[in-house]
Image (cartoon, rainbow, N blue to C red):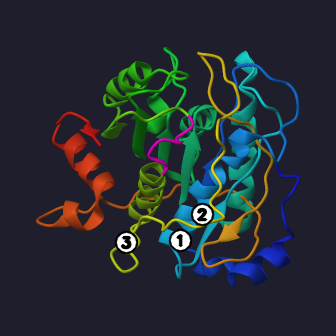
Amino acid sequence: MGECLMSRERLLHAIGGFGRTAGVIVVVHGGRSIGRQPTSPVQLSVLRMLPVARAIRHALRGIQVVVDRPRFRLRGWNGDDASPVGDLTALLDQVARDFGRIPVVLVGHSMGARAALRVAGHPLVSAVAGLAPWLPPGEPVSQLAGRRILLVHGSADRVCSPAETWAYAGRARSIGPVATIEIRDGDHAMLRRARLWHRIAAEFTRLSLALPADGGTVGMPARSDDVVPARSDAVPADGAVVPARSGDMVPADGGAVPAGHASQVAVPAVPSGPGAVADAGVVADAFARAAAGQPRAVL
């Protein structure tokens, strides 16, 4: 990670200055359990996150945020090396150097979700969403304290276990509230009901940064260039999806930009009170359920 970063001067020009930036959103692709080959920009697991990042940018259009879609150096988790964790930590450290004290929201898929949850304790991270996450037994949860956490899994995922995700959520609730959403018939690659997955990711980032909805709509309209791969990279049953190198950091209102790191950031409150769930949507509903100790939302 870090190979494709822009200069500080170009980044400042692209976003109009760090002082005006509301937050940084990092969209993290999946990979596999073992894989020491370098990642590729045309890897299916990398490409799968393109429409996710686009949905987030669309939901936050007109708001000064940076959306980064980095690429891990290696394709795999690689046992105790936990290769993507080092990559993400380096990226967050750079965000801290470049932006200072700014909230960072991580949205990860599969292996990328596991890595994002592992680095949740970084001082800049305020929220993490795990989409079809790879969360084998024994994953630590103490680093989640004080962060907003959302876990979303499809009931038809045959690559990463939904049961392991719900078990992880159960353990994590000893640290703090964890919102969970089950997608009926959702698959690992998030191809079935893709727009719902995209909407959830976009809505989560908006809520996590306490940003207003644009016209009351968080979901992203279908576009002809929203190409979703027909299948994701093969991943072992205990694996996840995709590795990455840093690149394509883009403000929500357009313009290519890089990534970086920072300090402890407060987590904005989830909307509450009459009408809050209806206004904010399914993600706010999931957090309301978590706060009330109710079962996960099923969509």
Q: How far apart are marks 2 and 3 (CA)?
A: 14 Å
Which element is circle 3 on? loop
| Residue nearest the observer in this picture, 256 or 216 | 216
Decide: is 113 above or below 101.
Answer: above
Mark 2 surroundings within 10 Å by alpha-carbon count, few (fewer than 14), some (14 through 19), many (20 or more):
some
Q: Do the residues labelled 1 and 2 touch (CB within 8 Å)?
A: yes
Query: Please, what is the three-letter code of the amino acid marked with disc 2?
Result: Arg
Q: Main secondary structure of the magenta part?
A: loop
Mark 3 surroundings within 10 Å by alpha-carbon count, few (fewer than 14), some (14 through 19), many (20 or more):
some
- Which residue is denoted by mark 2 in the rendering? 54
Query: Please, what is the three-letter code of the amino acid marked with disc 1?
Result: His
Question: Which is more N-terminal, label 3 or label 2?
Answer: 2
Residue 159 picture quarter: top right
Query: Please, what is the three-letter code of the amino acid marked with disc 3?
Result: Thr
Decide if residue 216 is on the left or right side of residue 8: left
Question: What is the magenta range?
Answer: 189-194
Q: Do the residues labelled 1 and 3 touch (CB within 8 Å)?
A: no
- Which residue is denoted by mark 1 in the rendering? 58
- Which residue is denoted by mark 3 in the rendering? 217
Please say whether residue 218 is one of the residues in the magenta stretch.
no
| Residue nearest the observer in this picture, 172 or 137 | 137
Image location (x, y in percent) of residue 109: 57, 39
Q: Residue 224 carries which label?
A: none
Q: How far apart are marks 1 and 3 (CA)?
A: 10 Å
Decide: is 296 above or below 212.
Answer: above
Decide: is 196 above or below 63.
Answer: above
Residue at (27, 38) in percent of width and height: 298
Decide if residue 253 is on the left or right side of residue 187: right
